Amino acid sequence: MEEILTRRKNMDKHLVIADPYPQTLERIFSQETWERLNRIAQVEGPDGDHLDSKRFDELLGQAVAVIGQSPMPKERLDKAPNLRVIFNVEGNFYQNIDYAECFRRNIRVLNCGAVYARPVAEMALGMALDLARGITWEHMRFREGTERYVLEGNHNAQMLTGASVGLIGFGLLGRSLRPLLTPFRCRVQVYDPWLPESVIREHDCIPASLDEVLSTNDFIFILAGVTNENKGFLGKREFDLIRPNANVMLMSRAAIVDFDEFTAQVAKGKFKASTDVFPTEPCAADHPIRNAEHVILSPHRAGGIPQAFHMIGEILVDDFELIMRNLAPVRMQPAQPEIVQRLASKPVK
Amino acid sequence: MEEILTRRKNMDKHLVIADPYPQTLERIFSQETWERLNRIAQVEGPDGDHLDSKRFDELLGQAVAVIGQSPMPKERLDKAPNLRVIFNVEGNFYQNIDYAECFRRNIRVLNCGAVYARPVAEMALGMALDLARGITWEHMRFREGTERYVLEGNHNAQMLTGASVGLIGFGLLGRSLRPLLTPFRCRVQVYDPWLPESVIREHDCIPASLDEVLSTNDFIFILAGVTNENKGFLGKREFDLIRPNANVMLMSRAAIVDFDEFTAQVAKGKFKASTDVFPTEPCAADHPIRNAEHVILSPHRAGGIPQAFHMIGEILVDDFELIMRNLAPVRMQPAQPEIVQRLASKPVK
Amino acid sequence: MEEILTRRKNMDKHLVIADPYPQTLERIFSQETWERLNRIAQVEGPDGDHLDSKRFDELLGQAVAVIGQSPMPKERLDKAPNLRVIFNVEGNFYQNIDYAECFRRNIRVLNCGAVYARPVAEMALGMALDLARGITWEHMRFREGTERYVLEGNHNAQMLTGASVGLIGFGLLGRSLRPLLTPFRCRVQVYDPWLPESVIREHDCIPASLDEVLSTNDFIFILAGVTNENKGFLGKREFDLIRPNANVMLMSRAAIVDFDEFTAQVAKGKFKASTDVFPTEPCAADHPIRNAEHVILSPHRAGGIPQAFHMIGEILVDDFELIMRNLAPVRMQPAQPEIVQRLASKPVK
Amino acid sequence: MEEILTRRKNMDKHLVIADPYPQTLERIFSQETWERLNRIAQVEGPDGDHLDSKRFDELLGQAVAVIGQSPMPKERLDKAPNLRVIFNVEGNFYQNIDYAECFRRNIRVLNCGAVYARPVAEMALGMALDLARGITWEHMRFREGTERYVLEGNHNAQMLTGASVGLIGFGLLGRSLRPLLTPFRCRVQVYDPWLPESVIREHDCIPASLDEVLSTNDFIFILAGVTNENKGFLGKREFDLIRPNANVMLMSRAAIVDFDEFTAQVAKGKFKASTDVFPTEPCAADHPIRNAEHVILSPHRAGGIPQAFHMIGEILVDDFELIMRNLAPVRMQPAQPEIVQRLASKPVK
């Protein structure tokens, strides 16, 4: 510990604790962002996967920032008089932090979920166009030599241009997707009970009830995060409202739908669907959705792409520089006193 | 013939000859556009697939418009003193019309190619996102039980946002695709030797040489039409310029590429590609592209969807109404004296 | 004449006749566009203001293009076997050309009106914001020492954001203005009897009757050109429909309004208005509009700015290059057989 | 006090203290927003201009919200155990609140400055177009009978389309203005030392130094707020960098410029300018800027328009409803621990 203090005095840099598991520093920092960080910080990182817990506690006395999802109960915060910010680099707020105490001490808790929003939005649009035009399915027929030319295979083909679109949830994902839809001049309905209608309208969308969104649209994007309150809120009653031939893209969390019912309905062709998420991952080898028709399956690949991980380092360094200059962070998502306790995400074990 | 004249005098409507084969009136007119047309026109259509040639010639004396791809040599135009417009309802200008004589007589020759531009643009974008993220290929792995979760299958995943994009050809297709790319904030280079650079810049694109477009972009859309001059202009030299891992979408005509070379390069994984067009269609059962990896195959389905066909009726009636009011057409593409003879499209036999 | 022919053989360049009065070559060509033109053309221009008429006729035998508004009756066209294009560099089609003969011979007649559209659109927007917020009038009060701070002078201040906007006429001007309004998220109604509703909708506007446009909007832009048919079509009945406190921008031609009635109504404060055009210009020294309140006056300055004049040279050279390569022009407006005879513009004497 | 408690138990509504002076409830609430507020709140408002201080203190015990700029030192917060939010309805954060104590107690302090951003942005754009085209000045000449037609008065006319634009400050104002510039396809440089470059780039702007912004742009918008640190930071050295004929719009606060120098330079025509703000308001009767040429004067009218005031009520009720549902506010600006102490705004006395 003394050693650290000595070094630090010499270096006149901010001490930052890095314990990013299951992330790695290599994955989130590019050469450029790592250099930017080290220009103003001395980063004490893990030796192997994890930072030793005792070492972590020793460093806390001097640390201004923590990078990672480590537990931060009050006892730990008590040891960290200089702490200004905790950077979650995985994606969600976990319940292993004493948020109330952080708010009391003006310690920012920030998460990096925003980096996944655009990759997921692009994937969602790609899946919508794929379902509407049968790209994947007709390619598979082509491989088998049974492809159908021009009109023959196009009877159900749909255009996105001018179509009616519904979004369930309008957080980061919805806001990343919305501008991608703009040139298609769709009517976009949004169901989001956490937002005033004015915000939905400001994004050129129409506020709507859940039932309206489900029953009146050709394209339905499911983008809502999971909370303690909305698990499985899309079940039989809701799926029954969806139009035949509608395209349903499940992008956020499997837990918000009754996945068995979802599987049953797409297997019967009640609607077309794609899903990037599954109740357990990997998806069980005998799960019936594996063989269901009318569905495109994606093994949780929508968000976690190399560019997104590198973006974590960028927004983290941007905000760290601001906070060290006594400015408010502007790129990562700050934990909000009102809602952080309601989020259902759990840290990895 | 007298009968027709008599009827027409009574009805006081414009006589329109309809010989749309291989199109059908049912496919191109919705109830609404058909009614609009019949409000001001008496349409004499085919009895079966084709309008009898003799009947066609008889009707010419009174006709103000022809709907279809029928041959219109000078002798026929000589019999048509009231003819004002010929509507091609298939997609391209054919060489069975004496265009010079039409220009001399102020007879508009219009084609409906514009209706396919947006469906093709949507398909092109869908394919680009699919190739960049591996949607189709990972779905196929999922069906086989070998899907790879999160990062494992994402090492080559690319975002369209911020990517470099090249367009080869900037006619109707390119202009329909360009706005779909706007929210992705790509740098868009365009190679089109038929256009002044100013027009390319006006569409927020960067004029570039063919070699630049091929060698410096992550996404390359091939959108050029075929002329007498550009057949096979994309061959080995050109494909060799393309970056590894680039995504190439062939959307317009197979004839502009050396298709064997194209097949060989994608089979080897020199780049990723999708194609909607083939040198002969149906594609030969033993064509090596059927089994090539790194390619998505689509049996000429990008343009010919039901909504596009219905759009033909809409733009046709819009322009017919204008021409009957002595106004210039604004929706279909007029044959241009300078270029109509250079187009390589052939009518169906 | 022989001299010209000899020179031309040597030079192997296209002969172009330039008789641009009242324009000047200096005003329309930048150094760069003049060089581009001279790279492929030998330009024979005026000696002083005008090109001698006899010289003009001599040059016609070899000329491929005419730059200017010179009379082109059939007798002249008969002397011009190589003529391919006539470039009007003033702004409108005049009735001193035998258009029918030009169409018969595939001679393009092109005008440069497009260059004024964007400058006029910017001015129109500037005037709309000025009227809505009282920029000019409150500045004048400030100069007199009677300015009113904050709310005191803002009781009638209007926002363009979210306002209702009506456009009368949707040609080049309307289409240049429309995108400037996009970020304000206005409802935009359009009255244009020359266009199908579909075209208006494609530009994200709502087709409407003249009376609707006048009676339901806070901002009304008058953008219609004059034809033989629409002179004075906005008179008392129409002005009476306009809402109190509406902002009316007269941008195109004074002849389409009953200017006395227009003056009377703005003088009484029936609505607020700006005008860039007057029945006679200069406006009569005792014209009552000079002292009318509620109006902003602009002495025909909306279109004719230096950048617009230089743009003429650019689009002319762009199209000249295309035509010389046997391609269709894409930047200037081609005379259309159906409508060129209906335009009411007269050449300058 | 008992009376209040009794009433409140009966009504089962949230108690809200309203002391909005110098605002008024009438000005900020429309009929609709007032009804929405009263549906869930019992509002105790002022009797006359001000709420009596003793009454205020009595109400604090039950109040969940305060509407107004009243002093809120620790002693008052101690009396307010149920307080959740303080709504500033004037525009800035004042230093009469114990912010640290509010953060400690999770009391949101919100301001309404956002409502002025769009009106100011519209005014800024209107002024830019006015200066570039001389709308106001040529109207004044017209009134005097010395107007100049077409080119004669247009030698210095500038287009915004394609121009180079610099923004000094990129907070709420800059972000409201940026989209209005999009259709003009300008290069937009931004100087804002409080923001990472990435944020500036995400808004399609180019990060630049102050000197670059001043020296390389045709249009310069001054949009920075005042802090303790940036008073008068635009002085002689900076104004000397501005291009001749540039258009400078001073929109935010007079205190950030050396106003005497600003006046001197515009009077000499070093550049053209407009200003909506003055070092003292009303501007001194003998202030030299009153007679300076090359300037448009506006008596602090850019933000305070009726629609903006009504918007205060709307965003306040939106956020109040969210907070009462235990959700985070999304429309008003929350005080940020890092920066609220640095802002230089003072409450009205």
Image (spheres, coloured by chain):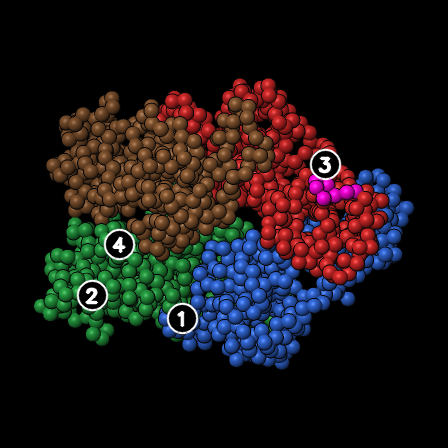
Chain colours: A green, B blue, C red, D brown
Q: The residue under label 1 is which amino acid type?
A: Asn
Residue D150 seen in the current view: yes
- For the residues beneath circles 4 and 2, the answer to whether they share a chain is yes
Q: Which residue is mark 3?
A: C347
Q: Residue at x 43, y 36 (%)?
A: D269
Q: Residue at x 55, y 28 (%)?
A: D147
Identify the element where label 4 is drawn: helix
From what the image shows, is residue D339 above or below residue A293?
Answer: above
Q: Which mark is residue B154?
A: 1
Residue A66 seen in the current view: no
Q: The residue under label 3 is which amino acid type?
A: Pro
Q: Which residue is mark 4?
A: A322
Q: Position of residue D3 (x, y in %)?
A: 17, 26
Q: Nearer the viewer, residue A269 or A45?
A: A45
Q: The residue under label 4 is which amino acid type?
A: Leu
Q: The residue under label 2 is which amino acid type?
A: Gln
Q: To which chain does the residue with label 1 belong?
A: B
Is D63 left, or right, of B66 in this rendering? left
Q: Mark 3 or mark 1, which is nearer to you?
A: 3
| Magenta-colored stretch includes residue C30 | no
